[in-house]
Structures are given as C-alpha cells and as structure tokens.
Amino acid sequence: MVLTAAERAIWPVRDEECNRAGRARAMTVFTPVRGWARLPSHAGVEGKGVRVPGWPATEAVFLWVRANRTGLADIKKLSFIHFARWGIIRSIPDLGQGAEHLRRPLFMFESNYNGTFEQYIDAFSKVIGSGIQAFWFTSDGFPGPIPVQPFKEYIRANELVLDHYYCAYPVESATQVVAALELRSANQSLLAKAKDLDPEAFARALDTVLSPASPAAELRGQDPLRQAWNAARELFRAAKGPGRRSRNGRSYYFTSLAPVLPGHEAELKADLGALAAASPFAAVPEVHLARWLVIDDWPDAPGRRIKLRSSYLLCTAAVTAEEDTSSDDLLGSFLAKLLAADGAAAIKVWSHCRNFPGGTNIEAKVDYLTSSQLDTVLFYLGYDATPAEVDDAATHRDRLHSFARANGALDPAALQKAYLEASPW
Amino acid sequence: MVKPGCPDLQLSDIQGNILRGYPSSRATYIFYSFGTPEAGRALLGALLARVRDATDWGERRPATAVNVAFTFAGLDALDVDPATLALLPDAFRVPMAERATMLDDRGPSAPGQWDAGLGDGTAHLLVTVNQTRKDVEAFEAFTAEVAQVKAAATTAGAVLRHEQLAEALEARREHFGWADGFGQPAIAGVDTDAVGGSPQKDGSWAFAAPGEFVHGQPNEDGTTASDPTAALLRNGTFMVYRKLYQDVVAFRARLHADAVAYGATLTDDPPLTDDQLYELTAAKVVGRWRDGMPIEDGERRPPGEEDAYLGSKAQKNPSNDFRYRGTTSDLDGHVCPIGAHIRRTNPRDALGWEGGSEMTSTHRIIRRGMPYGKPFADFTPGETDDKIDRGLIFICFNASIERQFEVVQRQWCNDGNAFALGNQKDYILGDRLLDPLTGLPTATGERDGRRGCPDFSIQSSGHAPFCLDQGTPVVMTRGSEYLLMPGLTVLQQLASGRLDQMRRGEEAAIDEVVRLSEVGLAKTFPPGSPHVTRDQHAKAHGCVHATFEVLDGLPDELRVGLFDRPRTYDAWIRFSSRASNRTAASDKKNDVHGMAIKVLGVDGPKILANERDATTHDFVLANSDTFFSRNANEYVELATKIARGTAGLVLFAIPSFDPRRWRVRQTLGIVRAVGHEVSNPLQIRYWSQTPFALGPLAVKYSARPQPNGAPAPQTGVDTDDGLEQAMARQLAAGVATFDFMVQRQTDPKAMPVEDPTVRWDEKASPFVTVATIHIPSQSFQSPARKALGEDLSFTPWHALPAHEPLGGINRVRRSVYESVSSTRHDRNGVERSEPTEFKDC
C-alpha cells in the first residue's frame, strides 16, 4: 500500500499541528471488521486455514483483556499513553438520521499519546506486536505489526484528522504525570512523619523521595485456569448502555457520535476551527483530554467501503471525578458543566446536529448526548487521578525540586526545619 | 536484527565514506546550484569519474576522495519525475527552514542566523572533497582536486552557493576537547565485530542491519522498500549536513562553574583537585572522558591520567563494549548520568525493553563529522573569546531522516521525556531556554521531570540528583541541509537524464522471477545432475566463431560506445532454442530461437560491478520483434500461469470480463514468437525486443541475414537436431553474414521504453546498419566447442555503460542473470569468468 502524493503532502501538517495539544497527540483510527478472519499464525492454533467470525472474535479478545488485564502492564511500562479507548461499532443510535446497523462493524481506536507517530508505532509494533495482532487481526487490510512500514501506512491511511483537541495539562507527558503522582504520594508520607524523624534520618528519607529507583521488573504470568474463570465472570458481568463499559475506576471515557444536519458540515468545521485554544472543555475541571471531529468523508483506504446515512460529529472526552460517583452522575455532571458553564460554544457546536434540543433546557441536551454514546470494549487508563490532582502533583514536584535545589547545602537539622516551614506543599 | 552471514552489499555502487569512514584530515564542502537540468547533468557528468565508491583501496591509498549528494531542490532541478519525487520522505522534501522549528533551530540557532546558501533552498548539489592521506603530496592533490571540481563547475555553468573547509584537530578531538567520531554502529557485512551494534538480551551484540544506512538492503524490520522511489534510492543514503558553531569560552566557563558546584557535593578522600573535578564533570555530561574512555569503564581516574586513553591502542579499537544495565547495572545513572550526551544519542540497552534493542535499533546513525575553524588555546579562567568562527560540520548518514536522525535530535537530545527526564535537554546541544512547546524563550516556571530539574542532572546513589546550571546555549546552528547521496548507477542515470521509472512492486516481482527460475533450475536438475544448463535457451544449435565489424561512416549520433570507430572484433555467437531442457527438446517442435553475440576484446569499464574489467560486450537477440510481457509483474503472472498449461495461458490473455484488460499484444507476441517454422537459424532475422541506451539515445537492435546464395524456405526440420545439421551444412561449405542494425526511438509515446510488447514502427524509424557480422566457414560440432557454448554466460548487462539496457524487463534480466549464472557455474564447478581474448578450442 503506497499513499498518493496528496496524502503524503498533508502528513507533516497532520502530525505536527492538527492532532496535537502540547505534548499530547491524538490518534483516531477506524477500521472495518471482516466477516470472517483468519487466525494469526502464532495465536497458538496451527493450520493457517482456521477462520473465525470477525467481530465476535475481537469481542472475545477484549473480554479476555478486560478480565485479566493481559498486556496492559506492558503498555503502562512503555509510558507513552495517557488514555486510550477501543470500541466496536455495530450500530449507531437513531437521533433522527435513522438507526444504522453496519453490515461490516467498525473497529475504533483512539489514543492520547506522547512522542512522534514514527516512534509510537515503532515501539508498539516491536514490543507488543502480539497484542496489536490480537486487537486488529479481524480488521480488513491489516498487514500485521511487522514489518512496521506497511503497518504505519495502514494506520496513516485509516487515521482521521481532528477538528479540535484539548488537553488540560499540555506541558505534562504521561511519563511525567505518573512520576509526579508518585513523587507527591512519597512526599506526603514523608510529610506525615517528618516532624518525628531525627535530622539524619529525615535527610536520608528526603533523598529517597527525590531519587526514586527505576521500577523493578514485574512478575508476569497468571494461572490459566484463574484467567479462564476471570473471563467467564467478565462474560456475565452486566453492562448496560448506552456507553457500555466506558467506565474505569473513577474515570469515564465519553464517546458520542451525533448525526450532523445535512449541509452543515463546513460550517461546523469552521466553528470548531474558530475555537482554537479557547476550548469549552477548559471550563470542566473533570476533563483530561477531549476531541471533536467531523466525519463527513471516510478515508479512501484500500479495502474499505464505509457508507453511512449521515455525516457525524464525534466527541470523545476522558474525565475523572473527584469522588467515587455513579457513572450517570459523573457523566451528567460533566455534560451539564460543559453545556452550562460558558456553554454557548459547546451548544453552538452541537446545534449543527440533528434533533439537538434547543432552548434553555440543559437536561434535554444532556439526555441527547447521553443517548448518542457508543459502547467501549476497553478503556486504558495511564493513571488514576483527576486533572486537578495531576496539576497539584506537578506543582508539588516543581516546588519540591526548587526547594531541594535551594537548600541542598544545608545540614540535616536546618534542612528539616526548612522543609517543615515550607509545608504545606 | 540481522542474522549472521554476509549481506550482499554492492560496495562498488555505494559511495565511499558512508559505511566506512575515510581517514580524512581535511575536507571541503562545496554547494552548487544549476540553472537548467542540462547544466546539472553536465556538472554531474564531469564529476562522475571522480566519485569514490566504497570498495577497498588496496595497498596504495589515494590522496583524495570526491563524493556528491543532492538536495531535494537539486533533484527537482534535474527534472526527475515529479511523481517519484512526491513519494520521497517529507523530511527531505520540505524546505529546511520549515523543519528548523521541529529541530529546535530557533532563537540564536534560527535560519535567520544561518550562513548564506545553507537551508535557503538555493543549493542543489553538494560536492565533498576529502584529503585521505596526510603527506605533502596529498595536500597538493587535495588543492588540485578542489580546483578541478571548481573548474568543472564553472564550465558547466553552475553557481557556487556555499563553501566550507573543515580540518581535523590534533588527536581527532572536537573543539570542546573530546576525542570524537568512534562510537559508530557495527554494521553487518561491513564490520567484523558486532560490538556497538544492537545490544541483545543475552548480553551479546548483534550487527545493525545495513538497510538502516543504505537503501535496497534489508533494514531492521527485515524489509526493503519497493515503492517507486526504490530505483532512485537504490544503494543511496540520506545525508544530514549541519554547521554547528561552538562557543568554546562560554562552554568552558559554564562547565567550570558547574564543576565547582558539583565538587562541593562530593566526599572523595583525598578531595579531587580542581582539574580532576573539571574533567570528572566533563565526563559526566558527555558520558566519556575527553580521551574517549567511557565513564562506565571507570568513574575516577588518577590525576594526570585523564588523557591516558588518547592515541593508545584502546582508542584505535574504540571501547564500545559497554552497557548501562547488565554487569554495571547503571540503569539509574549513578555512574553515567541518564542524560549524558552519548547515553542520549545511543541509549544502548538503557532504553531497551528488558535489555534488548527494540526501542533503539531503528534510531541509529553513522556520523562523519569534522571540526572547522582554528582550535582555541588551553583553558585559563576568565579568558575572553577570540571571536573566531569554529565548530563542527556535523554529518550523518541514515536511511530515514525522520526515523533516525530526527528522533535522536528531537526526542533524545532536545527533550528528556523518553528517559523520564521531563524537559531536560542535552547539556551540549540543547537550548534549555527554549520552551518545549512553543519554542519561545522561557523565563521561569519550568515543569520538571521525574528526576527533577530543568537543567542537566547528575544522579547519584542515595542522594537527590545534583542539578547543573545549563544556562545559555553553547552550540548554535549556522546552517542545515538534508541531502540524498545516491548510488553510483543512479548517479550515472541522473547524469544521462534517464532514471529508471520503476513500477510499483517491481522489486518484489523481480525477486519472484529469480525465485521461480531457481526453483525451475532445481526441479529440472535435481542435486546430482551431471550438468546444469541454462534455464532459458538451454538448447544450443551451435556456438560459432565470428567477426563483428563496426562500419565506417556512421552518423555522428550513432558513433557511441562500441560503435565509436570502425574496428573489427572477434566474437562468439551462440544460436539456441528457448527449450529449458536441452535433451528433451526437439527441433521438430516450434520454439523461440535466439542469437547471443559475445563481442570480444572490448576495452573500458563495463556496467556490472562484479565484471567491470571484463572485455566482452553481449547482444542477446531473438527471432521475434516484440517481447511477450510488458513488465516484471506481468512476467511473473505469465510464468505462474503458463505452468498450468493452455488454460493458464487463456487466463493470462483474458484476465477479466473487461476487454480493456485483455492482453492482445502479449498473446500475439507469444503466438508469433513460437509460431515460426525455422529450418536454418543462420537465415532468419533476430531482434533485441527490449530497448538499450546508445549514449543519450534509446535504440533497439536487430540482426538480419544477408542472402548468401539462395535462401532456403523456412519450413521446419524433420529431425531432433535438424537445426544444428542445417547450420553445419551451410558452414561446411560457405559462410553466413548478418547486418547488425539499430533503430532509434523517435517518439517516446509510440515507441515506449517500458513496454517491450509494443513494436517500434520501422516506417517511422527505419533500422540503420552499424556493423556486419561475418561467420566464416567452420566446423563447430566438436565437444570442446559445445562445452565452450555451455560455459559462456550471455546477458544484455555485459555491456559498456553507453549501451545500458533500459526498461523493466531488462532489469529483471539483470537479477536473473546474476542468480542463474552463478548457481549454474557453482553447481558445475566452473568458475564464471568472461573470455578475455579469442581462442578457438
């Protein structure tokens, strides 16, 4: 598969500008799922002719991953991803455009990552190639993770360009966030006992906080019987829609696909473009990362013939609540804040969609967006913290390092005194 | 990772200095632009003979070496096919100034500060002249070589855009004082020891794949590119040229201040002297002591011995055998800081996945830099700048600029995130005053990383990392260019303006043809077969001695290569049938007939690198004027389908219901080729079918028999060796004579180069006789003569460069020839060599 000159020409722009918010980069990939897919040769089944039904096979793979967290530790260790989400779209809710039941379901992947596309894909294909194989083997035209060049071209060809991308903390990478959260928690436990330590012990403890050792290699492998049991339990775990399985701990990955009013596509794109840095998501403290994207023209990638009734506005947002609230409350409060606080901008965006309720009734709008949600098959969390906690940890880290730098020459007793005086951090 | 074994590097087609560095003491880099494609070709043509390849120099090392590379603007100005150019990588295509922001070439390094002629899109061609010996004559030769290059440029009308002289400093140091240039990847097929290649989980090293540095070779993913750019990139590499100014005074002052502060935290007993501290801090920020010894090999050195390594045996065999995990277990940077220069630029196993090289093996570069400007005097505190322009001409070679150089520069040097160092940048190269997001200078409020500070941090066991004060930048970019350093064949083609227009997937198709013919050969001749013949044209009717007389009075444009002056050559001519198994074939069956001419005693270098000094020139002809497949892909399809018999042939002819896809010409070509009834191979006409260069022209060849007596009607023969007998009868009593003719391409559309199924109209461009072939009366049926006919290898690629075979089918023939001929001779135990002079047997 070779891209046309025109496709190549927009790459640098895509890579550098459109899909970027500070350190964060966005990837949004839709691939059609085959009716029947051949099992990858190293899936443990010998004989190349073994074919399995498309989407049920992929559902099974993700069920297993959800149940046993297989491979997720590796993704965490790679430390490139803030949040990622996988979904299988078999139908799109009817919001006036008529319900869509896709003959060939769409496999959807979106990621919020750091680094460059080249590095990201290189690392993934080399390190967790078998995971990629398992996730995408039912996708039409998927060339396999290795060699990496055809895989990169496959992703490029199926990737969409965003119209709006927001990150609450654009200067922080996933690696930095994880480290800052660890540092903060280590410092908080030191703070709790700092008063009672003798100065020498305190100085040693502070040094330990400031120079964490590299994490030791994790133990791998689980009892296969246990894993099978986990998978069976997962199979019968109730999940109700819309937006099934979009919840992970305190966090929620909101994914909405709303039909755009015919003829409104260009205007909607212009409105999104005009938002630029002034994102309506900034008014919602629970939002880490969010994107808006008008899907009016599917990429003309080889092997895909996606025809839908309508153009759609895709909105996704990774949100984390302060406390352990119910999914409904979490989602409702996020949407209400998005639409209410300085809501004119967000409402203006969705007013280009079919049947989006007008007037001042926020609840009706929240209901509309709630019902426009898509199901998730896997929601990967790079870290479990609210944006406020992330920001606090980063501030904490910066202050602690400035403190260490300024007071590094003090003797332990003076250092302890200065440390206690400088708190709370 | 490359398995042991020697990859097939075509060193004579790869420019020198890429895979193995020149022992260069001086180099001049001259950037030219040219106004027209013709001027560019003229300049390249004038330089071609000087360009040094990568073959061994042997006993006597030459004094100088010339190499050339093109910018994207240069390829564009040469009129290379825009569709091909559009597929070249973005990094190479976009103007350098656009790339500058991504590379942190901002603020004091911004393109506005660059030297004229660099990175502004004006330069087309870079000529590099290296002085490769140190003696006085070598310097004179260097000066003369530079003058000759400039004279050639003036003659061609090229404009000089930028010129830079670089000279090695004493002990191969760079201006900040480090011995430089020996930490290079170990490459399969080039280096003998894998140390410094890719670290493996078991503690060993693997060679880096040559395809990471030279196109057309397998890379770390085990693949070679086969898109339409492959022909242009073959045996070439991308080159990064950066002029980096080094502010020696500022660097020394900064390092000195940092050393004093860092020293205050150390508890050595006895305390380190100021000099020791300065050297230790220097070793910490770079990861090597100034004499090149890795700090992993020792964190403390006796006073006065910091340079012990320099010039020693160890430096000649540079210490690359160290890692950051494993035995030293320095993952936390307690010996070599995590952000040290050499640990960033080549993280070895530190960034690996459990000690492997998954995250690093595709991000390696070969560096061939050289300092410029006079060295600064020894360090004295409080010294002032002498305002002399000095620094490094940074040069690196890589197959992908985006994946290799730019990852090292952007992700590893100008950012710390990959190493969990937050926003920290390289102590030497990084401009930490630039905001990582906006690129604008920052004042305060940097966000730090896990190990903590915005500046360089030195990790130590049990202590918080010590932060140096990185301050203002000390290395500033003064110019930058991305270039393509093509292979020598491609240079020739660029000079003649006839770059192969490779079809998509052609390389893969060629590989498949080679595989099919090897499979075919192995099937026809299972192991133990007494004699392995050709897979094509195996049945010989006779190998005859002849003379090839180039005629006098040819038109000027045809007086090229072999035809440049009237002369008579000896020649062997082998008449044959296509049948792939000579014993099974009968002359009673119709077949394709061939006439392969080997002209002997032809002087001048030949096209094939392995047979450059051969004195033969081959013409390979058949008794039909068109070929039966348009290109490699179609050839593969035909070969696969024909194995299924007539039904396969029908499938080939009518591959779909769409009449536009029916292969009428090809099918007619097959029918015509085998449809001839032949009773005497000496009395039929032959054609080359595919086109060839004749200097700047494209031509097809043909050989037409002169009527020697009454021509016999061609009605076939009735014995299995009837054709051989017919030849024997004619040559027993008389002679045979052929007119050897060329037909010029006059209309590129109606007479395509890339589609040999199209007949070039003889009315539009008639054949012109350029030579006469005389076959004297002889007896050719002796066993010795038959053996000779078997051992000769014929290929259109046995040719002078002026007669280069053109088009996809000829490219297939090149690969097939090289594979089949060597297999055949290996298995027959006969050394493959071209006859040097005529010697009858």
Image (cartoon, coloured by chain):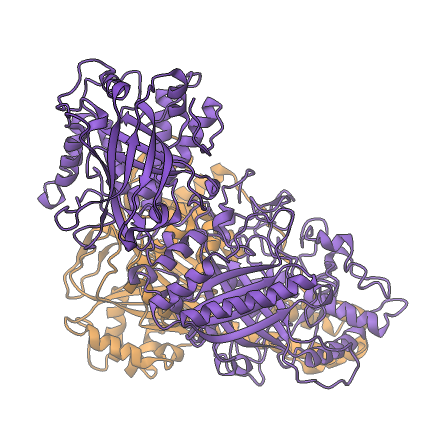
Q: Kindly identify the residue that appears in the image at 77 percent across and 52 percent down.
A: B313
Residue B396 screen position, x and y as percent: 54, 62
Position of residue B644 relative to residue B206, above or below, is: above
The residue lying furthest to the top in this view is B719
Q: Kindly identify the residue that appears in the image at 54 percent across and 39 percent down.
A: B6
Position of residue A272 relative to residue B16, above or below, is: below
Return the residue nearer the eye: B695 or A206.
B695
Residue B133 screen position, x and y as percent: 66, 59
Position of residue B653 relative to residue A167, above or below, is: above
User: Does residue B315 appear in this view?
Assistant: yes
Chain A appears what colour? orange
Q: In the image, is B838 to the left or to the right of B516?
A: right
Q: In the image, is B562 to the left or to the right of A264?
A: right
Q: Kindly identify the residue that appears in the image at 42 percent across and 72 percent down.
A: B158
Return the residue nearer the eye: B406 or B681.
B681
Residue A3, located in which quarter of the rendered image?
Answer: bottom left
Q: In the image, is B623 to the left or to the right of A110?
A: left
Image quadrant occupied by the C terminus of chain A: bottom right
Return the residue nearer the eye: B100 or B740.
B740
The residue lying furthest to the right in this view is B270
- Which chain is represented by purple in the image? B
Q: How many tags in the picture?
A: 0
User: Does residue A328 appear in this view?
Assistant: no
Q: Kindly identify the residue that appears in the image at 65 percent across and 81 percent down.
A: B471
Q: In the image, is A152 to the left or to the right of A180?
A: left
Residue B715 screen position, x and y as percent: 13, 21
Residue B38, located in which quarter of the rendered image?
Answer: bottom left
Residue B446 screen position, x and y as percent: 58, 79
